[in-house]
Image: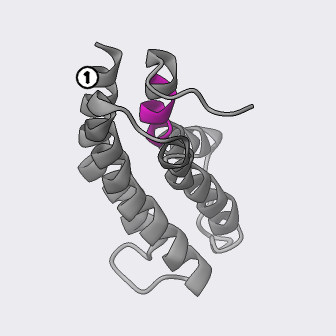
Amino acid sequence: MIIAAALVVAVVSVPTVGGLMAWGLAGGDGEPKNVVLGLLGALVGFGAIYNALVSYRAFWGIPDWAWWLMWVPPIAGICGLILARDEVSPDESSSPWDWAVGLAMPLALGLPAALLWASGVVAPAV
């Protein structure tokens, strides 16, 4: 049941959380502010698709390395959020609420990995 929840969360995250965050990091309607943000946006977008595929594959078991790779999109999203802060012009101020929502998005990308770990389908080496 937890694996099914991870799959649903991962599939829903692809167009919503992953797509929007990748679009924002990659420059939105324009060019990326720098190459690093563009690459982080690609990691978030393609990583969200990867998480959905691994969550589906989890019904039959997944290796540890595949589970560890599921953490790339949330980490890339958090790094992009931190690095994008330097790219905001002085006349574009962000409220603490904006940053809280921005932080919640990459954390949501980590939810499928956390659910798969909770289901016991993968036992990461400690």
Q: Which residue is mark 1?
A: 4
The image quadrant where one finds the N terminus is: top left
- What is the quadrant of residue 2 in the picture? top left
Name which quarter of the figure residue 57 lies in: top left
| Location of residue 74 in the rendering, given as x and y in whole percent from the top left corner | 54, 48
Q: Whole-percent x and y of residue 64?
A: 54, 41
> Is residue 101 visible in this depiction of the protein?
yes
Q: Nearer the viewer, residue 3 or 42?
A: 3
Give the residue displayed 42% in from the left and 86% down from the top. 31
Q: Quadrant of residue 42?
A: bottom left
Q: Main secondary structure of the magenta part?
A: helix
Residue at x 28%, y 48% (from the top left corner):
53
Q: Residue furthest right?
A: 126
Measuring from the top left, give residue 104's x and y in whole percent: 52, 37
Q: Tag 1's secondary structure?
A: helix
Q: Is residue 8 above or below residue 98?
A: above
Q: Is residue 95 left or right of residue 67?
A: right
Q: Is residue 113 magenta?
A: yes
Closer to us: 86 or 106: 106
Dot 1 amino acid type = Ala
Q: Is residue 70 magenta?
A: no
Between 54 and 96, the residue placed more toward the observer is 54
Q: Residue at x 56, y 74 (%)?
A: 37
User: Is 86 rendered above or below residue 18?
Assistant: below
User: Magenta span covers which residues?
Assistant: 108-115
Is residue 116 toward the left or the right of residue 37 in the image?
left
- Name the residue located 41 percent from the left edge and 64 percent from the top edge: 22
x and y percentages locating residue 81 in the rendered image:
61, 58
